[in-house]
Image (tube, grey):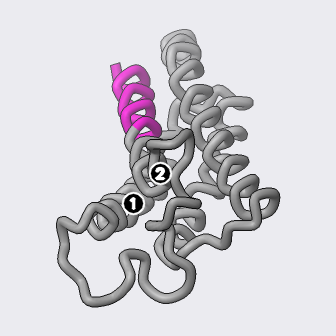
Amino acid sequence: MREATVQSEDRAWLPTFGAWMIALTSTLGALFIGEVMGQAPCDLCWHQRAFMFPLAVLLAVAAFRSDGRAWFYAAPLAAIGWLIAAFHNLLYFKVIPTAIKPCGQGPSCSGDGMILFGALPIPLLSLAAFTAIIILLLIVRRRTSA
């Protein structure tokens, strides 16, 4: 029995590590944009950070420990962050009409300064990161429950 648990946790390490790398890259990218480039995040970006930053720590510990149950405690954070990012994208791309700035109170990330590599808006990158993390955590769940 113990051998089967160790084997399933070994199979879960790579997707857990991948999810951690995405969370770490997203966290460092957000810090770089805010602290180095000097662009203040909008309210919705702040809320997304509140769910991405802890993922970088939780998934690092999970990968280090080869914890096959990482999906259990990391997936809820990623899912809530994904919901905020999805709503942010609906506002950003004007799918949801609103009389306020796309990002609510504070700075707006709909300006040209918030587009990376000439074509990628930050809200879309956030949604992609949360989506990839969720997919990898679902792979972890599948590999550990088999």
Q: Which mark is residue 85?
A: 1
Considering only vertical position in the picture, is 101 above or below 33? below
Label 1 packing within 10 angstroms: few (<14), some (14-19), many (20+): many
Q: Which mark is residue 128?
A: none
Q: Residue furthest right?
A: 36
Q: Secondary structure at mark 2?
A: helix
Q: Is residue 94 left or right of residue 18?
A: left
The answer to whether mark 2 and mark 1 are in CB contact below 8 A is yes
Residue 113, by quadrant, is bottom right
Q: Residue at x 67, y 48 (%)?
A: 29
Magenta residues, start to end: 132-146
Q: Is residue 134 magenta?
A: yes
Q: Identify the mark nearer the N-term, 2 or 1.
A: 1
Q: Residue at x 60, y 43 (%)?
A: 23
Q: Is residue 54 magenta?
A: no
Q: Residue at x 66, y 40 (%)?
A: 25
Q: Return the x and y of residue 51 as percentages of the image width and height.
A: 54, 61
Q: Please tell me whether the stretch drawn in magenta is mainly helix, strand or loop.
A: helix
Residue 65, by quadrant, is top right
| Residue position for label 2 | 126
Label 2 packing within 10 angstroms: few (<14), some (14-19), many (20+): many
| Front-most of residues 92 and 142 | 92
Give me the C-alpha separation between circle 2 and circle 1.
6 Å
